[in-house]
């Protein structure tokens, strides 16, 4: 697990703010589910045979005997909230977004954390293909709003349980014929979870899958019509996509449409991919055409999850974006880091009387809309000016005993080294005038440079 502060915190704030704006413009309300849920929400919803539940779930037992788990992903928890609060009675579909920490007991390595952040979108109570296209659209809009480049949308359909069962039989026959060519971990999945072998990152397995049957050829008529409608909506929206027949999702609740969004990144460090709607770290993935990229977001339809958690709602679709992963990609692509808040004024106080008055002056300046900084615990003018210099603060206010008595403040320009004394009542207006001139001067210099 990792601490988030400084530049990293500013990156996270930037990502969340951009996603929040896109969510609002699409009519999504925010939801925040508890970090702790009943273990069965994920054991039943995500799937008892998945890596998340078998290997990565943080669980605990309360003094009362309840079995709880730290949230490893958000979709099952959001659907639980939908069912528990009777949201089926609301106008449908219900649209939610979130930006929350998730927890998985994963192997620690560069860029992979056991507490990580995801932002996501959920459209609940709708089984029409138009909702699938809407979920993809809002996800792409969010990634584009962040300034990410070279995005590639991969889509596929894994069908409903009936279609998947028919395909699994054909797939298992093929895999058994090529078992010796598969990686050892993938050999074990032939019986338990053969679909996961399709997106194996092992080169041996990828070579063995060159002629594997494609699931799209085994969709029933209803699934085929649904998927064709999704693709037609994407074409209507002018959203380019790559049909990726090996794209599957590792959670049991997925059905029909699945998708991932990649960003081309030749300089990125390959990482193994985590299961889930969106992975938390920068994983490098190869599609069927051999293109490599980083998966930034993923999602799909999860109609069966409602039935698992006790609802007769028609279904839902959603996506999730790995925030740490997006931040890594923004850096790789050369985006400028969000700048820290730049103090406009540093307040220096000298003596006990000035210190008592300084906090009130600090608040007065803050309320007036000025970015003000102070180090109240220091009494030396040299130490305070040294801090102001490190912060590159353009103006310093000096408040000593004489100034308190005279109801004045000294304004010092750190760049010019000049200073003047102004009346306290005129301080805010004087500062705003000086800062306004400084901003105008910067704009002029930029134009002159051009």
Image (cartoon, grey):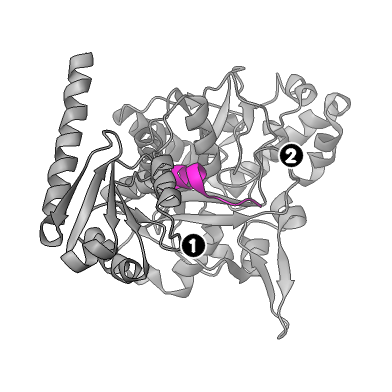
Specify whether residue 5 is painted magenta.
yes
Q: Position of residue 116 (x, y in %)?
A: 59, 50
As drawn, which residue projects farthest toward the front?
402
Q: Position of residue 215 (x, y in %)?
A: 61, 33
Residue at left 68%, top 62%? Answer: 43
Tell me the CA gap for discs 2 and 1. 28 Å
Q: In the image, which residues are magenta?
A: 1-13
Judged from the image, the secondary structure of the residue bearing numbered disc 1 is helix
On the image, which quarter does residue 347 sit in? bottom left
Q: Position of residue 373 (x, y in %)?
A: 35, 54
Q: Are there few (<14), some (14-19), or many (20+) residues within 10 Å of tag 2?
A: some
Q: Is residue 443 left or right of residue 71?
A: left
Of discs 2 and 1, which sits in the foreground?
A: 1
Q: Position of residue 167 (x, y in %)?
A: 66, 37
Residue 369 visible to the viewer:
no
On the image, which quarter does residue 211 sit in? top right
The vertical placement of 188 against 403, above or below, is above
As drawn, which residue projects farthest toward the top?
450
- Magenta stretch, main secondary structure, is helix
Residue ID for mark 1: 78
The vertical placement of 248 against 75, above or below, is above
Residue 53 visible to the viewer:
yes
Q: Between 388 and 449, which is closer to the camera in this rendering?
A: 388
Residue at left 16%, top 42%? Answer: 434
- Checking the image for residue 287, the label placed there is none
The vertical placement of 131 against 351, above or below, is above
Q: First in sequence, mark 2 or 1: give its number.
A: 1
Residue ID for mark 2: 194
Q: Are there few (<14), some (14-19), or many (20+) residues within 10 Å of tag 1?
A: many
């Amino acid at each position: 697990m990792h601490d988030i502060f400084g530049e990293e915190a500013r990156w996270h704030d930037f990502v969340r703010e951009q996603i929040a704006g896109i969510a609002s413009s699409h009519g999504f309300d925010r939801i925040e589910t508890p970090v702790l849920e009943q273990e069965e929400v994920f054991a039943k919803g995500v799937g008892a045979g998945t890596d998340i539940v078998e290997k990565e779930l943080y669980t605990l037992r309360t003094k009362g005997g309840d079995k709880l788990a730290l949230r490893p992903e958000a979709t099952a928890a959001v659907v639980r909230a939908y069912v528990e609060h009777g949201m089926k009675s609301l106008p449908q579909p219900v649209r939610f977004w979130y930006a929350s920490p998730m927890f998985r007991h994963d192997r620690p390595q560069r860029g992979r954390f056991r507490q990580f952040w995801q932002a996501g979108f959920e459209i609940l109570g709708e089984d029409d293909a138009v909702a699938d296209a809407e979920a993809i659209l809002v996800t792409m809009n969010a990634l584009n709003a962040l300034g990410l480049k070279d995005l590639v949308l991969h889509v596929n359909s894994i069908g409903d349980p009936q279609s998947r069962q028919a395909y699994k039989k054909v797939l298992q026959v093929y895999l058994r014929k090529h078992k010796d060519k598969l990686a050892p971990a993938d050999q074990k999945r032939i019986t338990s979870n053969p679909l996961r072998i399709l997106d194996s990152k092992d080169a041996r397995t990828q070579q063995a899958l060159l002629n594997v049957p494609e699931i799209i050829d085994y969709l029933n008529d209803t699934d085929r019509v649904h998927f064709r409608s999704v693709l037609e909506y994407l074409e209507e929206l002018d959203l380019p996509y790559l049909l990726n027949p090996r794209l599957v999702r590792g959670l049991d609740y997925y059905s029909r449409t699945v998708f991932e969004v990649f960003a081309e990144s030749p300089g990125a460090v390959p990482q193994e991919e985590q299961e889930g709607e969106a992975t938390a770290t920068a994983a490098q993935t190869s599609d069927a055409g051999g293109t490599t990229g980083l998966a930034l977001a993923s999602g799909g339809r999860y109609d069966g999850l409602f039935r698992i958690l006790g609802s007769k709602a028609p279904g839902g679709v959603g996506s999730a974006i790995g925030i740490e992963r997006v931040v890594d990609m923004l850096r790789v692509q050369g985006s400028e880091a969000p700048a820290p808040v730049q103090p406009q004024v540093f307040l220096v106080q000298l003596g006990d009387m000035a210190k008592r008055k300084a906090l009130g002056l600090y608040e007065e300046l803050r309320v007036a809309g000025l970015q003000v900084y102070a180090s109240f615990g220091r009494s030396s003018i040299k130490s305070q000016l040294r801090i102001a210099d490190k912060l590159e603060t353009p103006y310093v206010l000096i408040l000593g005993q004489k100034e308190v008595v005279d109801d004045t403040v000294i304004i010092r320009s750190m760049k010019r080294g000049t200073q003047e004394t102004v009346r306290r009542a005129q301080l805010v207006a004087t500062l705003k005038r000086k800062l306004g001139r400084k901003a105008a001067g910067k704009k002029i210099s930029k134009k002159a440079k051009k």
